[in-house]
Image: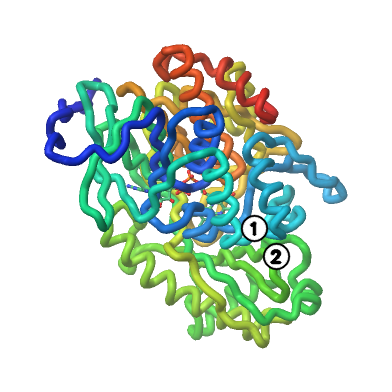
Amino acid sequence: MKGWKIENRVNEYSELTVLRELDVLVVGGGSAGVAAATTCGRNGLKTALIEKYGFCGGAAVAGMSGTICGMYLASEDPSKEPEQVVFGFTEEFRRKLKEKGGVTEPQRYGRTFTVTHDPLMWREAADELLMDANVEIFYHTAVIGVVMDGEEYKGVVVESNAGQSVILAKRIIDASGDAAVVARAGGEYFFGDNGVIQNPTMFFRMGGIDMDTYLDYYGEDTICPPEVTAKILEVNASGEYSLPRHKIWIFPTTRPGEIMVNATRLAGQDGRVLNVIDPVDFTEAEVFGRKQVRDYARFLKNFVPGCEKSYVVDTGVEVGIRQTRSIEGVEKLSNEDVVTCRKREDSICRSPWPIELHSGTKPKLHWILEDWYDVPYNTLIPRVGENIIVAGRCLSAEHEALASARVTAQTFEYGHAAGQACVLSLKKNKSLRELKGQEVRARMIAAGSRI
Ligand SMILES: Cc1cc2nc3c(=O)[nH]c(=O)nc-3n(C[C@H](O)[C@H](O)[C@H](O)COP(=O)(O)OP(=O)(O)OC[C@H]3O[C@@H](n4cnc5c(N)ncnc54)[C@H](O)[C@@H]3O)c2cc1C
């Protein structure tokens, strides 16, 4: 395969202590990683999860993307009630949040619905699920290398305050969002559309909102009304503001008088598209993201009724990252699969979410109406390499397809699928690539998924 090389590195780390020998190691504690590790642990596998932060949640919590999108059908009919079509681990997590008072009822988002969650409760829900499933969690621990034997993934090298060590595992689930394991093993990946990826966004929350006045003006739809866009254009023209995104989204949260704002659009100061895999770009996104938050907050305070006494509560722990590396999988979800709502026997997840492409001044939305497309199992399997499966937003998908397939309801279910695949693979003594999507899907359905 062109450009492909996995070096034999089984002895490269022989000086390091072996910290654990596991059935399954999950790298990354975002939505996909939590679902994957919980599934493996629950099925009796000796499982650990590694996360570089001190909490789970990834883009949904550290990046504060803050809603579970992708559960409900979209429709042209504004009177249609929310119709949920994605269940399984997604629904289990939503219910867990609900018990804690950490998630809203469905909120309108254009032609569909979403729910907004509390990022602190998200962390606690994940801790509980993982601990109940006997998953060993290593927070503040990062994967920095991979132990390979030819094409076989044998383990990873981790670094924490204690130094470096090795964790060996029979199966590895790369749920890092960035394909951190596959990339470090020399595996194949690509970035978006010939290197162009979606822009990052710095989320923020604002308190002190007079909700009745605010909702009277803004309306129930979390996508801003045309008056807000017109006002943004007007104030930009005055030169007093620099608000690069003209269509913004605001979600009332579970806390009284609080909103969560998805408004900023971050590009390099020289106009280049930022790729946060590069620490220079990542830093620029953080610094200018915080600055842009202040501009949008000032705009809301001055021009949106109900926000007069508002203040910034917080920003994301990190800038929200929509897209970095996608693996070259055995199969790639295509843009056409999405727009034609292709159904598959080997599907491991439905997605009714629109293509929500963030580039330019207005995010592009391509709606999927009263339907969904299926995501096949083999989008999680790298073309080369054994004992490895990915889960989450680094699955193999074309640029616009990923702009739909990356949202949280789906990433939970990709994690669920990767977990069930590891259970099956170890039980049947088969490689992950030998498994049929149909077998994985059957286990998922037995565990509550609807596919
Ligand atoms: C700005 C923005 C807005 C969004 N809006 C929405 C929305 O409204 N609704 C919605 O449903 N979805 C939204 N999304 C998408 C959604 O949040 C993410 O796609 C989804 O959460 C990704 O989940 P994941 O588990 O695949 O990856 P991530 O959430 O990225 O999790 C990966 C985890 O791996 C960890 N990690 C990475 N590398 C390493 C390493 N080397 N060692 C150890 N740990 C590592 C990370 O710290 C992280 O916790 C949005 C995303 C962004 C960025």
In three-dimensional space, the C-alpha distance between marks 1 and 2, rounded to whole angstroms, equals 7 Å
Give the amino acid at mark 1.
Answer: His
The quarter in which the C terminus is drawn is top right
Question: Which image quadrant is residue 207 in?
Answer: bottom right
From the top left corner, tell me how far across and down residue 142 is, in percent.
Answer: 31, 49
Say whether marks 1 and 2 touch (CB < 8 Å): yes
Q: Is residue 420 left or right of residue 325?
A: right
Q: Is residue 422 left or right of residue 122?
A: left
Dot 2, how many residues are within 10 Å of its Cα: few (below 14), some (14-19), or many (20+)? Answer: some
Q: Please determine whether, in this image, residue 376 is positioned above or below residue 136.
A: above
From the top left corner, tell me how far across and down residue 367 is, in percent.
Answer: 66, 43
Q: Nearer the viewer, residue 219 or 202?
A: 202
Q: Nearer the viewer, residue 50 or 133?
A: 133
Identify the residue position indicated by label 1 in the image: 117
> Can see residue 193?
no
Q: Circle 2 — which element?
A: loop
From the top left corner, tell me how far across and down residue 235 is, in percent.
Answer: 57, 81
Q: Please determine whether, in this image, residue 386 is positioned above or below residue 221.
A: above
Q: Is residue 320 left or right of residue 223?
A: left
Q: What's the residue at 53%, 51% (across, down)?
A: 127
Give the tally of numbered discs. 2
Residue furthest right in the image: 79
Q: Earlier in the sequence, mark 1 or mark 2?
A: 1
Question: Which image quadrant is residue 352 in?
Answer: top right
> Can see residue 216?
yes
Q: What's the residue at 61%, 59% (across, down)?
A: 121
Identify the residue position indicated by label 2 in the image: 254
